[in-house]
Amino acid sequence: MTPKAPGLAAVLVSTLIGCRTAPDAPVHAHPAAVISSVPHTASLSAEAKLASMDGRTALPLLPMMANHQKQNMRDHLIAVQEIVAAVGAKDFDSVSGSASRIGFSAQMGRMCEHMGAGAAGFTDLALKFHHTADKIGEAAKAHDSESVLRALSDTLEVCTSCHQTYRQQVVDDTAWSAVTNAAATGPLHD
């Protein structure tokens, strides 16, 4: 006879208790309150440790840029969800509308160039994502569900390739200036 596995509630409780990082934080404290009680240096060393384990290329961004990029990425995911739902309903006008949010525009192109100024190859991959997404709208105009899904798959392939290649690295103004100047003029020399 095999012993019973611990119940889900017991596993969750033991996990939560084992993960407490602030000794004087109440068990019911909001996670943000617990994190804010951790000394800043501990947080920095944890972030450095994570960065050292992540072999992807750092994409240096100012805090505002990193936040803006994350907001765009979340909207891209919503657009993908809307496209899938609209294809299922054969609502090709909605497919086109959602696809236009992830497709190429001059404004999107400028933003990709600015975001990628500190990491070689990022801008090209970001622009490829948006140009590939344009094919979703083209397929929707033809009312071709299979072509929409193929174009969506191709778009997501570029998306996942970018996420497998790059990770955000939030930097201050001094580091941003140094890395973007180095990217524009070549490596800095001593």
Image: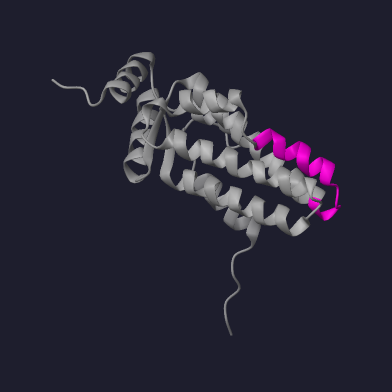
- Over which residues does the magenta segment extend? 87-102
- Examine the structure image and report whether residue 100 is included in the region drawn in magenta: yes
For the point 51% across and 28% down, which residue is it?
112
Q: Is residue 125 above or below residue 116?
A: below
**Main secondary-structure element of the magenta-colored stretch:** helix
Question: Looking at the picture, how far across and down is residue 108, in whole percent?
Answer: 58, 27
In the image, residue 81 lies at what x, y percent? 72, 46
Q: How is the image coloured?
A: one colour
Inspect this view and state whether residue 93 appears: yes
Query: Residue 76's x, y, as percent?
Result: 65, 38
Q: Is residue 167 left or right of residue 145?
A: left
In this rendering, position of residue 85 left or right of residue 161 = right
Q: Residue at x 86, y 47 (%)?
A: 91
Residue at horizontal 59%, vertical 40%? 131
Of residues 58 and 21, the one nearer the viewer is 58
**Residue 39 visible, this orientation:** no
Please name whichever residue, 11 or 173, is drawn nearer the observer in this view of the structure: 173
